[in-house]
Amino acid sequence: MKNQNKRKFITYLLLSWFLLSFTNCGYNEIQRKDEAVNAAWAEVLNQYKRRADLIPQLVKVVQAYAIQEKEVLIKVTEARSKVGSIQATPELLNNPEAFQKFQEAQGELSSALQRLMVVVERYPELKSDRNFRDLQAQIEGTENRIAVARRRYIQAVQEYNTTIRIFPNVITAKIFGYTPKPQFQIENQQQLEKPPEIDFNNN
Amino acid sequence: MFININKKLLLVISFFFFIFSVKSEPPKGVGGNIFQDSKKSVSFNSEEINFQKDKEVPVPELTGRVVDLTGTLTDYQIRLLSKKLEALEKEKGSQVVVLIVPTTGIETIEEYSIKVAEKWKIGRAGIDDGVILLIAKNDRKLRIEVGYGLEGAIPDAIAKRIIDEIIVPEFKKGNFFVGIDKGTDAIITLIKGEELPLPEKKQSIEDFGEWIFWAPLIFSFILHLIIGAFLAVLISIILFNILGIFFYGFSLEIFFIIVIASILGVSWYRFSGGSSSGSGGWSGSSGGGFSGGGGSFGGGGASGSW
């Protein structure tokens, strides 16, 4: 008798847990995580834009010092317009190809900026120019903000992707068409972090 | 027999508590360690236990407004700085803290700094008016981490200037206290010039002491004799929360205390031992603690080295 009661109890317990986990089948949670991803992405775009907006002033200040490595400046300007030409919207998240292109463009801008900063090291007056120092501080600050925003985006996407993959949410996700969101590729990041090589002999 | 077992159990449990409380060493911070002569360069705690250059460095506990894990500052200097920062919080509501670590380990100072910011949550929630002055002494690097809400008052360029023009010159001469003192002064000046929401008069538990506990308890007890336990608890919770919010603004702690007190009011006499254990500690416990206000950071600020 006791065993039967025990089994009943456990069965009911399991059944209620099972049923409870189906309450709205994670729909609400998916919504929340989806919104979190969108918010995080908006912040990433925000910081990328902030960086792009700083570039024209930077170029102007550097140009006033007539550095010899003009092509570095040109590369920065080119990279910036390339970034500007890509429509940076939330929709990028749904288009993996466009997302990849966007990432590459931003990565090129990062490299171009890094090269510029290395070149500037050779010009002490430019380096100590007040305007330049302020701009440099702003760009460094923005780069840091980009890094933080990217990290938070990665976390948000991890949570979202996990949420739509676990059972039973996966069913809800399929029904309503929620697909995994793109992650920042690690290979991309490694490339971003590689210090640029400058050939000083060519000038 | 049942009572005997209880007593034995109690004895065993208290024995273990005693052992554990004796074992736990005092915290790693400078604060009360009598062995530290702060003129010496490094605390015997920090280098060995927590800080290694090739590993991740854990975020220390927020033990106060000035956390010095290198023994650079004397107790007096720490108190001086803390008082100054406390005055700022009382006046403007913003929180500024100073953290000195030997090294940020394998991470850059920016990576470490944002970790600290996310854990400590300096500044008020929603207003995000926190600032962290982080110094990695052996790395010879420092950073001013600025919360979202103060990015207008302390833009990156200004933070960089504070570092380069005010703090670093002093650090280069080895005047760490002066550097930090002047640096925090500059930060405070900028914050004071900014329009921020006024600080809330923290009328929390310390002001009305134990009444926040006793009033709902007595009220619900008396009421439940008339209209039954459930209604009494419900009415007590609603009534006292309304009063509390009306007079003191909403606070989660107050809410919970009212709920617990109301429930205890109708059930205390069912416990054998009496349940008034909680009340004694509250009126005293509030004053000393400092904690982050829930502020968030976005990575703004500036770094420098000397």
Image (cartoon, coloured by chain):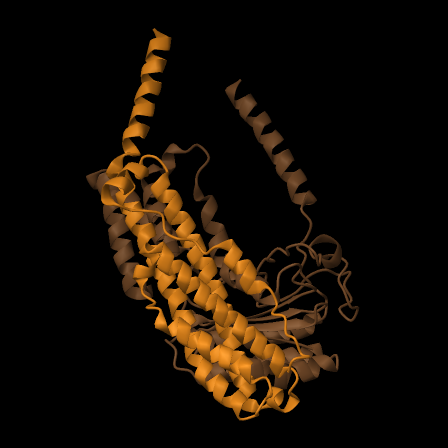
Chain colours: A orange, B brown
Residue at (72% x, 53% y) in the render = B49
The answer to whether residue A115 is left or right of residue A24 is right
Q: Residue furthest left?
A: B227
The answer to whether residue A64 is left or right of residue A101 is right
Residue B249 position in % (x across, y down): 32, 64
Residue B21 lies in quadrant: top right
Q: Residue furthest top?
A: A1
The answer to whether residue B233 is left or right of residue A183 is left
Would you say residue B116 is visible in this rendering? no
Q: Residue furthest front?
A: A202
> In what quadrant of the picture does the N terminus of chain A appear?
top left
Residue B28 position in % (x across, y down): 68, 57
> In what quadrant of the picture does the C terminus of chain A appear?
bottom right
Residue at (67% x, 54% y) in the render = B55
Residue at (44% x, 32% y) in the render = B272
For the image shown, how many numbered marks are present on the structure? 0
Would you say residue A197 is visible in this rendering? yes
Q: Is residue A131 above or below residue B81?
A: below
Q: Is residue B228 above or below residue B95?
A: above
The answer to whether residue A171 is left or right of residue B135 is left
Residue at (35% x, 69% y) in the render = A86
Residue A100 lies in quadrant: bottom left
Nearest the camera: B163 or B278?
Answer: B163
Nearest the camera: A29 or A115?
Answer: A115
Residue B265 position in % (x across, y down): 33, 43
Residue B168 position in % (x across, y down): 66, 81
